[in-house]
Amino acid sequence: DAKTTQPPSMDCAEGRAANLPCNHSTISGNEYVYWYRQIHSQGPQYIIHGLKNNETNEMASLIITEDRKSSTLILPHATLRDTAVYYCIVSTQGGSEKLVFGKGTKLTVNP
Amino acid sequence: DAGVTQSPTHLIKTRGQHVTLRCSPISGHKSVSWYQQVLGQGPQFIFQYYEKEERGRGNFPDRFSARQFPNYSSELNVNALLLGDSALYLCASSFLQTQYFGPGTRLLVL
């Protein structure tokens, strides 16, 4: 079973920041938080990952709480192309072990 | 740079047949994983291979098998197809801490 909890759906206005929450209250000290997204019928796309520090790349920012029990993925200026299912996953070695996907959050960006 | 490639993109089979799906990882990636995604669900892990050896297996029946070749490409084989095997089959290649997914093969079993 997935070790994360996400809201099933969210809406966001185009051009606004999209803040996607994820609860991972049972995360272990050596587990990373990974975010992927899946646009309809395509393969999941890696977005970002982090251990305990906040991370930022060209796609998004990842904010992890100090106790590491929750995190937020931030898309700073959402576009219609960001409409997708977003998955939050915890993993000790995301490259070399299985990823356990939950149902994710369906983000709809509205014009 | 070329990403993970999978073939074929779509496939239709009938119950009882077998199918072979193929995956080419990103250049330099030595690990390949396979996932099954049925409609409305997140991907479910099937296998992981690293340097031609099986590193992990998910909760799938023995009808599912896979192998990895010296060039790190991989095949997923499914025998005695059932209607419930209809799904999107995803391949991911790994480098360091991250898996990168291909576009998938959509299998329909009639």
Image (spheres, coloured by chain):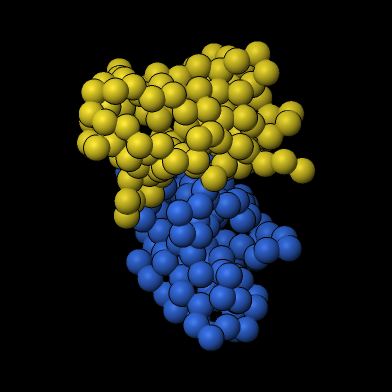
Chain colours: A blue, B yellow
**Vertical comparison of A44 with A106: above or below:** above
Residue placed furthest toward the right? B1
| Residue situated in front as seen by the camera: B100 or B76 | B76
Q: In which quarter of the image is the N terminus of chain B?
A: top right
The picture places residue B43, in percent across and down from the top left corner, at 40, 44
Q: In this view, does B26 lie above or below A105?
A: above
- Residue at image point 23% right, 29% down: B15
Residue A24 makes an appearance in the image: no
Identify the image quadrant of the C terminus of chain B. Answer: top left
* Point 53% across, 86% down: residue: A111
Left/right of residue A32 with respect to residue B106 in the rendered view: right
Identify the residue at image location x=59%, y=21%: B50
Number of numbered discs visible in the structure rendering:
0
Q: Where residue B70 sits in the image (x, y, percent)?
A: 65, 13
Q: Can residue A42 be seen in this view?
A: yes
Residue A85 in the image, given as x and y percentages of width and height: 45, 61
Occupied quadrant, residue B99:
top right
Examine the image and state in which quarter residue B44 appears: top left
Q: In this view, does B59 lie above or below B70?
A: below
Residue at the location (24% across, 23% down)?
B16
Residue B13's spot in the image, x, y percent? Answer: 32, 32
Name the one closer to the observer, B91 or B10.
Answer: B10
Q: In this view, does B84 lie to the left or right of A25?
A: left
